[in-house]
Image (tube, rainbow, N blue to C red):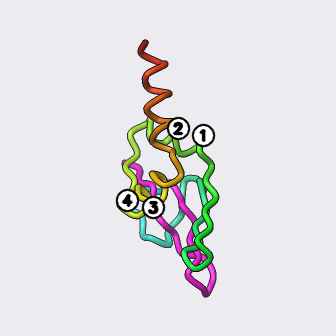
Amino acid sequence: MVKLRLKRCGRKQIYQIVAIDVQSRREGRDLRKVGFYDPIKNQTNLNVPAILYFLEKGAQPTRTVHDISKKAGVFMEFVLNYQTKFN
């Protein structure tokens, strides 16, 4: 099973948003980097097509990644893609 979670990078509080196997550690080997989050500067950079790909495959985002993605409107695109596939 795959999760979308934060992975810490650098000395400051800067995080990468990664797709990672559930059994891996937080700092373990990721499957793919799908975004970047800096809470101090309040900056977010997301690879929306990659996030949508993993969500379609059944990946579960952590609560924090879910909130970040929700602010960016990723789930609206997920719903629109889902509706166009089955209509």
- The residue that disc 4 covers is 62
In space, the residues marked 4 and 3 are separated at their CA atoms by: 6 Å
Up the image or down, 50 lies above or below 64; here it is above
Horizontal side of 79 relative to 45 (left or right) equals left
Tag 3: amino acid: Arg
Q: Quadrant of the C terminus?
A: top left
Tell me which label, 4 or 1, sits earlier in the chain. 1
Highlighted magenta segment, given as a residue range: 1-19
Magenta-span inclusion, residue 28: no
Identified by mark 2, the residue type is: Tyr
In the displayed structure, 72 sits above or below 58; it is: below
Q: Check contact, mark 4 vs mark 2: CB within 8 A.
A: no
Residue 49 horizontal/vertical position (percent): 60, 40
Give the x, y percent position of residue 30.
54, 59
Which disc, if any, is residue 53? 2
Determine contact: label 3, label 1, CB under 8 Å. no
The Cα atoms of the two marked residues, 4 and 2, are separated by 16 Å
**Disc 4 on helix, strand or loop?**
loop
Q: Which residue is mark 3?
A: 5
Give the label on residue 49, or none: 1
